[in-house]
Amino acid sequence: MSGRGNILSLFNKKAGPLIISSLSDDHDLDSGLDVDHSGSSGESFRLEKDMESDLITTLQNFNISVGRGRAQLIRTLKKDGPTTLTENDPDELKEFKNLKDNHTKNSKSPPLKPNTSRNDFFYPTVVHGSKGSSVNISCNYLELTTDGSKGVFHYEVRYSPPVDSVHLRMKYLNDHRDKLGETKTFDGITLYLPILLPNQMTVLVSKVEDTEVQIRILFKKKEDLKNCIHLYNILFDRVMKTLNYVKFDRKQFDPTRPKIIPLAKLEVWPGYVTAVDEYKGGLMLCCDVSHRILCQKTVLEMLVDLYQQNVDLYQECARKTLIGNIVLTRYNNRTYKINEICFNQSPKSEFQTKIGTTSYMEYYKKYHNINIKDINQPLLLSIKKSRATPHDQESIQFCLIPELCYLTGLRDEVRSDNKLMREIATFTRVSPNQRQLALNKFHQNVSKSPEAQKILNSWGLSLTINYNNLKGRQMEAEQIYFSKMNVSAGKNAEFSKYAVSNEMLEVIHLNKWIIIHLRNDTRAATNLLDNMKQCCKPLGMNVSKPTMISLDHDRIDAYIQALRRNLTMDAQIVVCICHNSRDDRYSAIKKICCSELPIPSQVIIAKNLLNESKNRSVVQKIALQMNCKIGGSLWTVKIPFKNVMVCGIDSYHDPYNQGSSVAAFVASLNSSYTRWYSKAVVQTKSEEIVNGLTASFETALKLYQKTNGNLPEKVIIYRDGIGDGQLCTCYKYEIPQFEMVCGDRIKISFIVVQKRINTRIFMGSENRFENPLPGTIVDKHITRLRMYDFFLVSQLVRQGTVTPTHFVVLRDDADYGPDIIQKLSYKLCFLYYNWAGTVRIPACCMYAHKLAFLIGQSIQRDVADSLSDKLFYL
């Protein structure tokens, strides 16, 4: 038995006779823990000390629903385990007295005690760098101030005689709102109030018919600020609800102000994403602008279109188009993920309810006053996991009516329409000035709403707009080293004109290569060959005449047979020119070239080679890619490390949850960080934490030793794809895998890289904000309390607002310090060879991401255990 029933079952045990305490100080304090709450006989007792021990043990293993509001809050606040106050605990009683005195005087609360049970990766001291020039920075954070006379006070509630029903417990407690106030959070046992009650033990009496129910409320402690974060986030969800926003996942959107795109039958809902947390600058609310794309066509209309396009393969096409997508039902403004399409059911089908069997047509008419028009349409199946316990495998199934559902997000056909994407971007691509205006608007809406202010004030919170007091640092421009010269990347960190006009750092001449193309695309193949000869001269690369293979038919099997017939052991690379873009053809080519007949491959769309004005620039980029894939390198930056290996890790998850997850690991093999070992590991579905790191890391160390003659003295690992909720798991599970291999020989530094964040930083002040330049570092004020972290802007963004990258240092055994780690992280952003500039994340993470995506999307298991020191996945 688990949950509330398990706690209640503890009270089926014997204890001494019950002595009820009153509010008088002359009586001993009694929490009521010896009361029988099982609801059975009520006459069997046990020793109070034994039962208290059982209760504490049970509460420590107690799982409450982690789904919504109150239950999740209670679970969060119970993490440190319950404490029982008695007169034998003088320190606790003294703390209560101090809290009571402070509450009476309306003074500030006592300082929080240090967290002695903190996670090991939390750094107790402030860690920040000093290198670089100082710049003024603004951000999208609002300060949250707390009322010293209020807080989150933890109480334990017991009933005598015992009351089984949680509903009745809440009802009886609500009878005393005049004493407890309107604001509270209560799950039947644990009570949280924003006020401190006058007495440590409060006894209330509710009259029920001819009997009385006694309610005992025992003060336990005032919760630390770190334990109140979840409550504050719940409060802002309530605030957004009072402002009539609709919640999609963790974001809030305004359905009353949609931006319509009539030609595409789309609408854009504006909104916000908010998050409260404790930072080095205090308690703050991060608030960013967000948008949601909705289709104005119903899912039923889309199904009809698919049927008309292909009657024979209608069901297969419908599943491929819809499964995995999110739909919105406007009658309740809720979202559901489509897991299956039930073609054997219709609105006429019946299902079981608490009051009997009914059809979907009758249900929607009765409860939503909606008449279903098409009675023969299939049903959409949505499956949600049960939130009863974290390990519960049960699920809840919803059957939805297609004509009431609207697809959300961007479909593939929309993404491929450049004109439409540009039109959508006019609404979603928000400039720094527009973001700050939206932030001011949010603050005004909350401040002017009496309901919102009541919610915040009841817990002693107030919102203050103050975002102009932030200092950042600007790093110096980097030098880019080619084979015979070096150039400055400049303040914009761009050097594309130098990349195509200077000899590459390490050139591999193209002596034996193959081109496969359709007969109709002969002109595209000729353009490629002619431009390759011209473009490769300044790059220092000699290009020999390739073997040309012409195909008569644009079929997948034609490409497969051509590859199998013509690939030889001495071929350096194969180039496939395809007439158009098709995922199945691309996957088939990559599967042959990566698994069955391993050889570097380059896939090109024919139309990209037919535009005379852009041919040269396209072929220049293709030539650079091909040199990397056959073992060359393009450029480097100066990283003055000796015997240091840099690694990158990332994972790929199937967006439709149909395939396995893939984890990729890459590691540097030379001192210029231009050659990389890579390996992919196939994992179970949706698994983020990597299992096979030990074997991959051992192989990388052996190759490093073979290349350099010695093992590295230090290893720096950049881990992408880890969210805040997985930091502790990563620290306890992934880092030990490296420690097992390194032992005491090699020192480890482990850095988590987070891209999907809501933090935005700007340069300027008042109404003249702009994006910061590449190399901007922020490691104060808005960084996490008790963490060693920083934000880095590595790219130049001219449209919209730049999103910084968040780095969290979990381990730094080498004791590099913040300046070296920040500088290294920025330098590595220059070494991704598919872009002559900087990328958002270090190159090792980008290579790991590309490899995981290629294996997961196109190849999967067949090549997962292959290794390579060439960037074949660029």
Image (cartoon, rainbow, N blue to C red):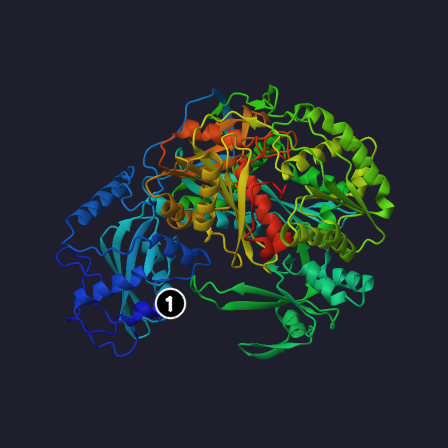
Residue 387 placement (x, y as % from top left)? 46, 63
Q: Amino acid at mark 1?
A: Val
Q: Quadrant of residue 111?
A: top left
Task: Check disc 1 and report the residue beneath it.
Answer: 166
Q: Secondary structure at mark 1?
A: helix
Residue 507 placement (x, y as % from top left)? 64, 30
Residue 313 placement (x, y as % from top left)? 77, 66
Closest to the observer, 332 or 485: 485
Residue 514 placement (x, y as % from top left)? 75, 43
Q: Quadrant of residue 214?
A: bottom left
Relative horizontal placement of residue 547, taking residue 764 as reference (left or right): right
- How many numbered callouts? 1
- The residue positioned 64% from the left and 39% from the top of the image is 629
Q: Quadrant of the N terminus?
A: bottom left
Residue 145 showing in the rendered view: no
- The residue positioned 76% from the left and 32% from the top of the image is 532
- The residue positioned 58% from the left and 21% from the top of the image is 491
- Asked if 796 appears above or below 485 in the picture, the reply is below
Q: Quadrant of residue 58?
A: bottom left
- Asked if 24 appears above or below 666 in the picture, the reply is below
Relative horizontal placement of residue 560, taking residue 337 as reference (left or right): right
Relative horizontal placement of residue 388, taking residue 44 as reference (left or right): right
Residue 754 showing in the rendered view: yes
Closest to the observer, 752 or 90: 752
Closest to the observer, 101 or 351: 351
- Asked if 167 appears above or below 139 in the picture, the reply is below
Instruction: Count residues near mark 1 (Cα–Cα under 10 Å), then give few for <14, some for 14-19, many for 20+.
Output: some
Relative horizontal placement of residue 33, taking residue 522 as reference (left or right): left
